[in-house]
Every structure is written in structure tokens, then in C-alpha cells.
Image (cartoon, helix red, strand yellow):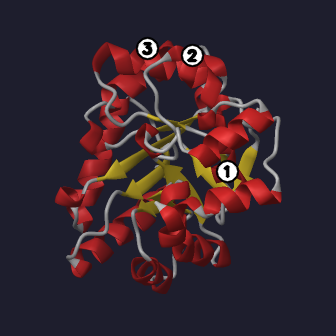
Amino acid sequence: MPGRVKLNNSEKMPAFGFGTWNLTGSKCVESTGEALRVGYRLLDTARIYGNETEVGEAIRQSPIPREDIFITTKLWPNDFGYETALRAFDESLERLMLEYIDLYLIHWPRDDKEKRQQSWLALVELAKQGLAKSIGVSNYGIEHLEETLNSGFAPAVNQIEFHPYIYEEQRPILEFCKKHSIIVEAYSPLSQGHGLNSITVRDISERTGRTPAQVVLRWAVQHDTIPIPKSAHAERIRENFKVFDFELSTDDMKMLDELSLTH
């Protein structure tokens, strides 16, 4: 079972999560419920996914206490601005039927710097009120992260696309986040299934007796990121979770890192 990672605001976040992008309706309720049964305690949704209601329903149907479940949702750029961000948060809370959110993220930085900064100040206010236990960002580059740090309130998390095929591209952001105690959350950690059949991944899979997906997820864990794989299949939901009882060697990690140079 994954443990919890201490964030820079002293809150604790599960070291592994379940993504819900592209899951809708009863399939979303069913898959999210299965993830909770398997042992996932971090659930990731967003206003733009159109499934906050379903994720909330899965939480209500689960016997797991609310305080043991870590819920992330996100502010879409169309709702940028101080008052509009606060209103969008209230609407997400209402759809989820929760009293608080564990982690609220700005989904994309976009170009409007002033509105982006106003939105961040709205998130800071939500954190101060305890309505969002932690706040962070998603898809932020270094210049955007510096902007939040200059506000005097550091994001706890930066959620970015992260898998072996874009490692070199994302590495500077990963290193910047480590330096500033910002946890990197890895979305699309399985590169949406592309590349799992590469010779390198297959070779490591055969040698370790693990599936290609488990190899790639373990790689993300060993880079100190929190992966949030998504699946609508019960078997894969269970399989993806089993990455905490083995380790990849230094050589295996290096080979996976180098996939981004040849891809």
C-alpha cells in the first residue's frame, strides 16, 4: 500500500492516485468505486471533466470515511478572476456534495497573467478558510511557478504530464519543483497506452516479472512523483496499484529516462 507524502503546508497526500479524465456517467461511479475498494485514496477530477457529481456519488457509496479520501478538483481558465474563481470552487463543492476539497488546482496557466494571479489569490483565500486544505497548479512551467512563489504562498503541487517519453522535456520543471518543495503529480503516466510495447519497457517487464504498465508507473514513483493513472477496467485498476512491492534498478531507471531522447 502506498503511504502518504508530506506537502509543504504539512498536509499529507496519498503517494498514488486514480485519475478520472474521460470517465462519465455510471462507468465513472463504478470505476471510482472500484478504485476505492482496491485501496486508492487519492481521486482526481476537474470541473471540465464533467464528472464531479459522479465522483462525489462514488465517495458517498463507499464505506471509507471521508477523512481518509483525498479529493482533487480544478479551476478551468474560463473561470479565472478572483470572484469567478471563488464561485467556480463553490459550484465544484456543490457538485461533489462535500464540505471541503483536499487539493484545488488551477488547471492551466493560459496567457492572461493578471486574471491568473487574481485566481491564485482566490485559491489562497480558500486555503486560509480551510475550504481547500491544500492548493496548487497544473501544467505550470517554471515562469508560472515563480509567479506563484512571488505571491508569498507556494503551491503544494504541480500536476503535469509525466512519463518516460517526455522525461527530458519535463525534467527542468521536476527539478525546480523539488528545489522548492512542490510535489509533482504525474498525469497520463502511462502515456495513454502509447509506448508500453517498446523494447525497453518489454525487456524490463520480462526481467522483473511485472507488467509494462507497472514498470512505467514504478519509474514515476522512483522519480518522487505521484502518478494518477486512469482506467475503466477493474483488472487494470487493481494491476496499476501494485507498484510498491518492487524497485527498478539504477540501470533500468536510466534506460527508461533515455526513452525521451529516442522517441
As helix, strand or loop, the secondary structure at mark 3 comes to: helix
> What's the mark number on residue 189?
none
Could you tell whether 117 is left or right of 102 in the image?
Answer: left
Q: Nearer the viewer, residue 113 or 35?
A: 35
Circle 1 is placed at which residue position? 219
Give the labeled residue for mark 2.
235
Disc 2 or 3, which lies upstream in sequence? 3
253 or 244: which is nearer to us?
253
Percent position of residue 173, x then y = 52, 73
Q: CA distance from mark 3 to mark 1?
A: 28 Å
Spot occupied by residue 239 in the image (x, y as percentages of width and height): 63, 24
Residue at point 28% right, 38% down? 49
Compared with 219, 173 (above or below) is below
Front disc: 3 or 1: 1
Front residue of this view, candidates 9 and 165: 165
Q: Residues within 10 Å of mark 3 (few under 14, many from 20)?
A: some
Label 3 sits on what residue type?
Glu
- Residue 254 occupies quadrant: bottom right
First in sequence: mark 1 or mark 2?
Answer: 1
Residue 81, compared with residue 74, is above or below; it is below
The image's mark for residue 30 is 3
Amino acid residing under circle 1: Trp
